[in-house]
Amino acid sequence: MPGASFVTHLQAAIDGTVLPARTIQTTHQSRPLWVRYDLDAVSRAVTRADLPDRPPTLWRYRELLPVDDDSCIVSLGEGMTPLIDCPRLASSLGIDRLLIKDESQLPTGSFKSRGMAVAVSMAKQLGIQRVAVPTAGNAGGALAAYAARAGMECWVFMPADTPEVNKAESRLFGAHTFQVDGLITDCARVVQLGRERMGWFDMSTLKEPYRIEGKKTMGLELAEQMNWSLPGVILYPTGGGTGLIGMWKAFAELGAIGWLESDRRPRMFACQSSTCAPIPDAFDAGLRFAHPPDNPRTIASGLRVPNAVGDFMILDAVRESGGRAMAADEHRLLEWMRLVCETEGIALCPESAACIGVLERALRDGTIAASETAVVFNTGAAQKYTELIRTDLPTLDPDHLDFDALAGS
């Protein structure tokens, strides 16, 4: 595997200002940065025919990732996640072909492994020793795990009503873990206030440039798994939005180096809950920047992001793709979780259940045609939401069994 990066510079997403790479950078005018590559050099250095000989991890796309020094790579073996055809689910929803890319099979049980693998690797390369993150779900555990792997100190701040598994895993991996009375925005304020005093580097979503580079590998993998012909539609659960933004960046880079079979790109659907839907509200209103809702709440903790720093990047990508931002009915999220679990055996998280709801609605109103191929991303494991899936089981007396009753239960 090559040991040098093709990064040329960083670029402010808000106004195009160029900043130097290979130095510690955060944001510009409090808005995110893009990582830019010499794509001509990438196209000369590697071809897609080289990939099958490489290990099946996100690091197979080394030339499109920012780490310069292989010794700085912090990895837990984050492999390629399966792309699963779902014919029974497709039939029940009324679409010809539906696939689910199951990110729950990554080392920390969610797509957050991708972003943190690359972000922590870059932090190590840049000499950072202390990291902190606000989180309402899986990001805390992922950062804690990769920080432990790197030998870094880690602080995690999460709302008090964050799922218990997320709280437990952060502490299990050795992070200084605290719950905060408030929303993820309040947790972010704690990190901001403590940066100078505590010496933390803020690993918040899009507050540093490199988590998005890890997340974009979802798009690189998807293209490779589909033989470089992209699907018609991608439905993505959208909180902070790095996954959707990253994939759209990945498709642009793949197009620039000539790896895609056609110029056609997927229509991107940003999916949120009806009770926390700043991105769909902004999309419908024709706005580039979203307004935080008054009372954001949802059982899908990863979607409860009332004020995404990359809101305009999400909306730009959705509009450029010809897609939409849509909200699913909050009260049916558990129903859609169970539907996927029962029909396909895939442990769908509540965030991705919103994608099933959006797909159902979009098929009904004609926004998505039944003839299109759709891909839904399952961004985390249902098993992490013990409070949601807990159930009371009936008790049997082995001395008094009624098998007729069992058959009808």
Image: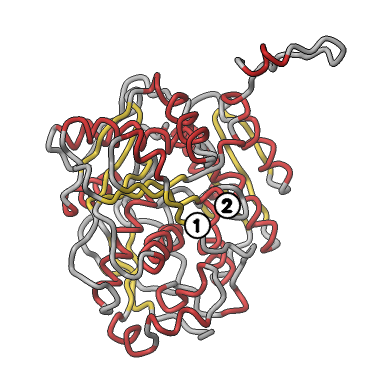
Residue at the spot of label 1: 82
Residue sitting farthest toward the bottom = 44
Percent across and percent down for residue 296 are: 38, 24
Pointers 1 and 2 in contact (C-beta within 8 Å): yes
Q: State whether residue 75 is above or below residue 338.
A: below
Residue drawn at x 44%, y 84% is: 50
Residue at the spot of label 2: 105
Amino acid type, callout 2: Gln
Nearer-the-camera pick, 392 or 61: 392
**Which numbered disc, 1 or 2, marks the residue closer to the eye?**
1
Residue drawn at x 35%, y 50% is: 375
Q: Quadrant of residue 125?
A: bottom right
Mark 1 or 2, nearer chain start: 1
Percent across and percent down for residue 130 are: 62, 56
Residue sitting farthest toward the left = 286
Secondary structure category for the residue under label 1: loop
Say how the picture is coloured: secondary structure
Q: Which mark is residue 30?
A: none
Residue drawn at x 54%, y 40% is: 345
Nearer-the-camera pick, 271 or 195: 271
Residue sitting farthest toward the front = 404
Percent across and percent down for residue 21 are: 39, 73
Amino acid type, callout 1: Pro
Secondary structure category for the residue under label 2: helix
Percent across and percent down for residue 378 are: 46, 45
Q: CA distance from mark 1 to mark 2?
A: 8 Å
Q: State whether residue 351 is above or below residue 101.
A: above
